[in-house]
Amino acid sequence: MNILFTICGRAGSKGVKNKNIKEFLGFPLPFYTASIIDLFIKKNVQYDCDIVLNTDSKDLISFFNDKLNMKVNIIERSADLSQDSTPKIRVIQNSYSTMKMRLNKDYDFIVDLDITSPLRTLSNLEELIEKKINSGADTVFSVTESRRNPYFNMVMETVDGYERVIKSDYNARQEAPDIYDMNASMYAISPELLIKGKGIFDSKCDIVKMLDTGILDIDSERDFELMQVIAEYLYNKINELRLVKDNITSILSDK
Protein backbone atom coordinates (compact mmCIF):
# COMPACT_ATOMS: atom_id res chain seq x y z
CA MET A 1 0.00 0.00 0.00
CA ASN A 2 1.38 3.41 -1.04
CA ILE A 3 0.86 6.46 1.15
CA LEU A 4 1.81 10.03 0.30
CA PHE A 5 2.41 12.31 3.29
CA THR A 6 1.97 15.99 2.47
CA ILE A 7 3.31 18.91 4.47
CA CYS A 8 2.00 22.26 3.22
CA GLY A 9 3.23 25.65 4.36
CA ARG A 10 3.27 29.16 2.93
CA ALA A 11 5.93 31.82 3.36
CA GLY A 12 5.21 34.41 6.01
CA SER A 13 2.15 34.66 8.23
CA LYS A 14 -0.20 37.48 9.04
CA GLY A 15 -0.99 36.47 12.63
CA VAL A 16 2.40 35.07 13.70
CA LYS A 17 5.50 36.22 11.81
CA ASN A 18 7.26 33.32 10.07
CA LYS A 19 5.02 30.85 11.90
CA ASN A 20 6.00 27.88 9.77
CA ILE A 21 9.69 28.11 10.72
CA LYS A 22 9.30 29.48 14.24
CA GLU A 23 11.03 27.66 17.10
CA PHE A 24 8.67 25.73 19.36
CA LEU A 25 10.11 24.49 22.66
CA GLY A 26 13.60 24.21 21.27
CA PHE A 27 12.89 22.89 17.76
CA PRO A 28 11.49 24.41 14.55
CA LEU A 29 7.74 23.91 14.54
CA PRO A 30 7.61 21.88 11.26
CA PHE A 31 10.04 19.30 12.66
CA TYR A 32 7.29 17.98 14.96
CA THR A 33 5.36 17.02 11.83
CA ALA A 34 8.44 15.44 10.25
CA SER A 35 9.09 13.54 13.49
CA ILE A 36 5.69 11.89 13.70
CA ILE A 37 5.91 10.81 10.05
CA ASP A 38 9.34 9.34 10.78
CA LEU A 39 7.95 7.42 13.77
CA PHE A 40 5.09 6.05 11.67
CA ILE A 41 7.33 4.92 8.80
CA LYS A 42 9.80 3.20 11.12
CA LYS A 43 7.05 1.30 12.94
CA ASN A 44 4.87 0.49 9.93
CA VAL A 45 7.30 -0.97 7.42
CA GLN A 46 4.45 -2.72 5.58
CA TYR A 47 3.58 0.59 3.89
CA ASP A 48 5.50 2.28 1.07
CA CYS A 49 5.57 5.94 2.11
CA ASP A 50 6.75 9.13 0.43
CA ILE A 51 6.90 12.59 1.98
CA VAL A 52 6.51 15.87 0.12
CA LEU A 53 6.86 19.46 1.31
CA ASN A 54 4.80 21.89 -0.77
CA THR A 55 5.80 25.49 -0.10
CA ASP A 56 6.78 28.86 -1.53
CA SER A 57 9.09 29.51 1.44
CA LYS A 58 12.82 29.36 0.66
CA ASP A 59 13.51 29.26 4.40
CA LEU A 60 11.24 26.26 4.92
CA ILE A 61 12.88 24.44 2.01
CA SER A 62 16.29 25.18 3.50
CA PHE A 63 15.16 23.85 6.89
CA PHE A 64 14.14 20.51 5.39
CA ASN A 65 17.07 20.18 3.00
CA ASP A 66 19.85 21.28 5.35
CA LYS A 67 18.72 20.32 8.84
CA LEU A 68 16.99 16.93 8.42
CA ASN A 69 18.47 13.55 7.50
CA MET A 70 15.20 12.09 6.18
CA LYS A 71 14.05 11.97 2.57
CA VAL A 72 11.55 14.74 1.87
CA ASN A 73 10.58 15.64 -1.68
CA ILE A 74 10.20 19.34 -2.38
CA ILE A 75 7.57 21.09 -4.50
CA GLU A 76 8.18 24.80 -4.95
CA ARG A 77 4.67 26.17 -4.89
CA SER A 78 3.54 28.43 -7.71
CA ALA A 79 2.22 31.93 -7.04
CA ASP A 80 -1.37 31.00 -7.94
CA LEU A 81 -1.38 28.42 -5.12
CA SER A 82 0.18 30.83 -2.60
CA GLN A 83 -2.68 33.29 -2.17
CA ASP A 84 -4.52 33.94 1.10
CA SER A 85 -7.71 32.65 -0.52
CA THR A 86 -6.21 29.44 -1.93
CA PRO A 87 -8.01 26.41 -0.43
CA LYS A 88 -5.59 23.91 1.07
CA ILE A 89 -7.28 21.08 -0.82
CA ARG A 90 -5.89 22.58 -4.06
CA VAL A 91 -2.36 22.46 -2.65
CA ILE A 92 -2.84 18.83 -1.60
CA GLN A 93 -4.17 18.08 -5.07
CA ASN A 94 -1.09 19.70 -6.61
CA SER A 95 1.15 17.67 -4.30
CA TYR A 96 -0.52 14.42 -5.32
CA SER A 97 -0.49 15.04 -9.06
CA THR A 98 3.11 16.26 -9.03
CA MET A 99 4.41 13.33 -7.00
CA LYS A 100 2.45 10.79 -9.02
CA MET A 101 4.09 12.10 -12.18
CA ARG A 102 7.54 12.64 -10.65
CA LEU A 103 7.84 9.14 -9.19
CA ASN A 104 5.52 7.37 -11.63
CA LYS A 105 3.63 5.93 -8.68
CA ASP A 106 -0.02 5.52 -7.75
CA TYR A 107 -1.00 6.26 -4.15
CA ASP A 108 -3.78 4.54 -2.24
CA PHE A 109 -4.40 7.71 -0.26
CA ILE A 110 -2.83 10.98 0.83
CA VAL A 111 -2.23 11.98 4.46
CA ASP A 112 -1.89 15.70 5.12
CA LEU A 113 -0.42 16.80 8.45
CA ASP A 114 -0.65 20.45 9.43
CA ILE A 115 2.62 22.17 10.36
CA THR A 116 1.05 24.14 13.20
CA SER A 117 -0.23 21.08 15.10
CA PRO A 118 2.71 19.79 17.18
CA LEU A 119 0.57 17.91 19.68
CA ARG A 120 -0.25 14.66 17.89
CA THR A 121 0.54 11.13 18.98
CA LEU A 122 1.64 8.21 16.85
CA SER A 123 -1.55 6.39 17.83
CA ASN A 124 -3.58 9.38 16.54
CA LEU A 125 -1.91 9.02 13.16
CA GLU A 126 -2.20 5.23 13.12
CA GLU A 127 -5.90 5.44 13.97
CA LEU A 128 -6.43 7.92 11.11
CA ILE A 129 -4.74 5.64 8.61
CA GLU A 130 -6.41 2.46 9.90
CA LYS A 131 -9.82 4.12 9.66
CA LYS A 132 -9.10 5.36 6.14
CA ILE A 133 -8.24 1.80 5.10
CA ASN A 134 -11.20 0.12 6.79
CA SER A 135 -14.09 2.61 6.94
CA GLY A 136 -14.83 3.07 3.24
CA ALA A 137 -14.76 6.85 3.72
CA ASP A 138 -13.26 9.07 1.05
CA THR A 139 -11.89 11.41 3.69
CA VAL A 140 -11.02 10.85 7.34
CA PHE A 141 -10.10 13.89 9.41
CA SER A 142 -9.27 14.70 13.01
CA VAL A 143 -11.63 16.43 15.42
CA THR A 144 -11.94 17.35 19.06
CA GLU A 145 -15.08 17.33 21.17
CA SER A 146 -16.68 20.75 20.95
CA ARG A 147 -17.03 22.79 24.14
CA ARG A 148 -20.05 24.59 22.68
CA ASN A 149 -23.13 23.15 21.02
CA PRO A 150 -25.26 25.02 18.43
CA TYR A 151 -28.33 23.12 19.62
CA PHE A 152 -27.90 24.28 23.22
CA ASN A 153 -25.44 27.02 24.19
CA MET A 154 -24.50 28.88 20.99
CA VAL A 155 -26.52 31.89 19.82
CA MET A 156 -26.63 34.20 16.80
CA GLU A 157 -28.05 37.63 16.15
CA THR A 158 -31.33 37.90 14.21
CA VAL A 159 -33.67 40.79 13.37
CA ASP A 160 -35.66 39.90 16.50
CA GLY A 161 -32.69 39.64 18.86
CA TYR A 162 -30.62 36.57 19.69
CA GLU A 163 -31.57 32.94 19.34
CA ARG A 164 -29.95 29.54 19.25
CA VAL A 165 -27.91 28.80 16.15
CA ILE A 166 -30.06 25.71 15.60
CA LYS A 167 -33.57 25.96 17.01
CA SER A 168 -34.27 23.21 19.52
CA ASP A 169 -36.06 22.37 22.76
CA TYR A 170 -33.06 20.80 24.46
CA ASN A 171 -32.75 21.81 28.12
CA ALA A 172 -29.38 20.19 28.80
CA ARG A 173 -26.26 19.83 26.72
CA GLN A 174 -26.32 16.07 27.29
CA GLU A 175 -29.64 15.90 25.39
CA ALA A 176 -28.24 17.60 22.27
CA PRO A 177 -26.48 15.71 19.45
CA ASP A 178 -22.71 15.28 19.80
CA ILE A 179 -20.82 18.10 18.08
CA TYR A 180 -17.14 18.11 17.09
CA ASP A 181 -14.64 20.79 16.12
CA MET A 182 -12.50 20.14 13.05
CA ASN A 183 -8.98 20.85 14.29
CA ALA A 184 -7.25 20.77 10.86
CA SER A 185 -4.47 18.57 12.28
CA MET A 186 -4.77 15.44 10.10
CA TYR A 187 -6.53 14.43 6.90
CA ALA A 188 -6.48 11.14 4.97
CA ILE A 189 -7.88 11.62 1.48
CA SER A 190 -8.66 9.32 -1.45
CA PRO A 191 -6.94 10.25 -4.72
CA GLU A 192 -10.27 10.05 -6.57
CA LEU A 193 -11.55 13.01 -4.54
CA LEU A 194 -8.55 15.10 -5.62
CA ILE A 195 -8.73 13.97 -9.24
CA LYS A 196 -12.37 15.04 -9.46
CA GLY A 197 -11.58 18.37 -7.81
CA LYS A 198 -14.17 17.87 -5.08
CA GLY A 199 -14.22 19.22 -1.54
CA ILE A 200 -13.97 16.88 1.42
CA PHE A 201 -17.69 17.14 2.21
CA ASP A 202 -18.69 16.19 -1.32
CA SER A 203 -18.22 12.54 -0.38
CA LYS A 204 -18.35 10.16 2.57
CA CYS A 205 -16.39 11.38 5.63
CA ASP A 206 -15.30 9.82 8.89
CA ILE A 207 -13.44 11.16 11.93
CA VAL A 208 -10.83 10.36 14.56
CA LYS A 209 -10.94 12.11 17.91
CA MET A 210 -7.94 13.87 19.43
CA LEU A 211 -7.20 15.35 22.84
CA ASP A 212 -9.12 18.64 22.98
CA THR A 213 -6.62 20.45 25.24
CA GLY A 214 -3.84 19.59 22.81
CA ILE A 215 -5.15 21.74 19.98
CA LEU A 216 -5.16 25.50 19.66
CA ASP A 217 -5.41 27.53 16.47
CA ILE A 218 -2.18 29.55 16.29
CA ASP A 219 -3.45 32.81 14.82
CA SER A 220 -1.58 35.28 17.04
CA GLU A 221 1.64 35.58 19.03
CA ARG A 222 -0.38 35.03 22.19
CA ASP A 223 -1.82 31.80 20.77
CA PHE A 224 1.73 30.64 20.03
CA GLU A 225 2.90 31.39 23.57
CA LEU A 226 -0.14 29.68 25.09
CA MET A 227 0.36 26.61 22.92
CA GLN A 228 3.92 26.30 24.21
CA VAL A 229 2.67 26.45 27.79
CA ILE A 230 0.09 23.74 27.07
CA ALA A 231 2.63 21.64 25.18
CA GLU A 232 5.26 21.79 27.90
CA TYR A 233 2.69 20.60 30.44
CA LEU A 234 1.44 17.78 28.20
CA TYR A 235 4.94 16.63 27.21
CA ASN A 236 5.72 16.18 30.90
CA LYS A 237 2.45 14.36 31.54
CA ILE A 238 1.87 12.18 28.45
CA ASN A 239 4.72 9.94 27.29
CA GLU A 240 3.27 9.38 23.81
CA LEU A 241 3.23 13.11 23.12
CA ARG A 242 6.76 13.55 24.45
CA LEU A 243 7.96 10.74 22.16
CA VAL A 244 7.31 12.92 19.10
CA LYS A 245 9.37 15.78 20.53
CA ASP A 246 12.20 13.52 21.70
CA ASN A 247 12.38 11.82 18.29
CA ILE A 248 13.29 15.10 16.57
CA THR A 249 16.91 14.71 17.64
CA SER A 250 17.09 11.43 15.70
CA ILE A 251 16.07 13.05 12.40
CA LEU A 252 18.40 16.06 12.63
CA SER A 253 21.24 16.17 10.11
CA ASP A 254 24.87 16.08 11.21
CA LYS A 255 25.78 18.71 8.61
Image: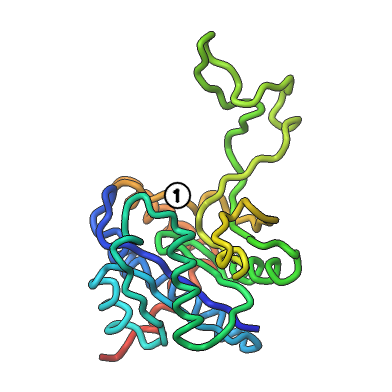
Q: Residue at x 71, y 25 (%)?
A: 172
The answer to whether residue 146 is left or right of residue 81 is: right
Q: Residue at x 64, y 66 (%)?
A: 128
- State how many labels appear: 1
Q: Which residue is mark 1?
A: 216
The answer to whether residue 80 is left or right of residue 59 is: right
Q: Is residue 142 visible?
A: yes
Q: Amino acid at mark 1?
A: Leu
Q: Residue most toward the bottom?
A: 254
Coordinates of residue 203 in the picture (x, y in percent): 67, 55
Which of the 4 image quarters holds residue 10?
bottom left
Residue nearest the viewer, comparing 119 with 218: 218
The answer to whether residue 60 is left or right of residue 100 is: left
Q: Residue at x 37, y 88 (%)?
A: 69
Coordinates of residue 220 in the picture (x, y in percent): 31, 46
Which secondary structure, mark 1?
Answer: loop
Coordinates of residue 114 in the picture (x, y in percent): 45, 62
